[in-house]
Image (cartoon, coloured by chain):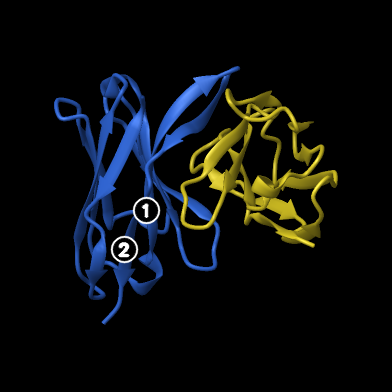
Amino acid sequence: DIQMTQSPSSLSASVGDRVTITCRASQSIFSHLNWYQQKPGKAPNLLIYAASNLQSGVPSRFSASGSGTDFTLTISSLQPEDFATYYCQQSYSTPWTFGQGTKVEIK
Amino acid sequence: EVQLVESGGGLVQPGGSLRLSCVASGFTFSKFAMSWVRLAPGKGLECVSTITGGVGSTNYADSVKGRFTISRDNSKSTLYLQMNSLRAEDTAVYYCARRETGSGSYFFDYWGQGTLVTVSS
């Protein structure tokens, strides 16, 4: 199985901060990488698909890049509603696997 | 509007069985692959099983292989997960999710609200 490793596991940030989360795959997954946001008690919400494509309806402060094994998710200016857990997920080969999550907390 | 509504969760003893259901609406169910994804307490997301929309090919995570069975009834727009020989480590919120394609890749674009499965004596 392809292992997905996110860093950091958690971070504290203030409203308005620029936040970057990284995700590393144990082997090349080309651009088959997706990002989700999950808030407590809610279902995950797709933010980015195929490494850099913003899902419809997602604010433009979210962006992502990368290919091969290394990927990043950036929030350009953190908003109060962005405090959540973020997951990367590879869809290159089954079983699809997720990173362990990055919890973004209020500083 | 796309909607996915899960049901069937609950408390079950170790070794027991449960069947989860996910009723879909707002799209042509038969055309989409569907998955079950779970979130265990203190852990990350895990894709448990996927079934394609056409011939209904299936795959499973190693952690549930041989114990869980995914199926679908396209006439009822319903996805199922039969869970047998349940273990404490199967305790989780189970989500159904729709698999979509775009830019040459796959992703989960719609999710249900989740149903809680608790395995405990």
Q: Classify 10 Å Cα crowding around label 1: few (below 14), some (14-19), many (20 and above).
A: many
Q: Nearer the viewer, residue A88 or A11?
A: A11
Q: Which residue is drawn at 54% across and 36% down?
A: A93
* A16 with respect to B7 (left or right): right
Check contact, mark 1 vs mark 2: CB within 8 A.
Answer: yes
Position in image of residue B31 (x %, y %): 32, 19
Check disc 1 and report the residue beneath it: B94
Position in image of residue B7 (x %, y %): 24, 50
* B75 with respect to B83 (left or right): left
Q: Regarding mark 1 in the picture, which secondary structure is present there?
A: strand
Q: Residue at x 40, y 69 (%)?
A: B89
Q: Residue at x 67, y 30 (%)?
A: A59
Residue sitting farthest toward the bottom? B121
Sooner in the amino-acid sequence: mark 1 or mark 2: 1
The chain that appears blue in the image is B
The chain that appears yellow in the image is A
Check disc 2 and report the residue beneath it: B117
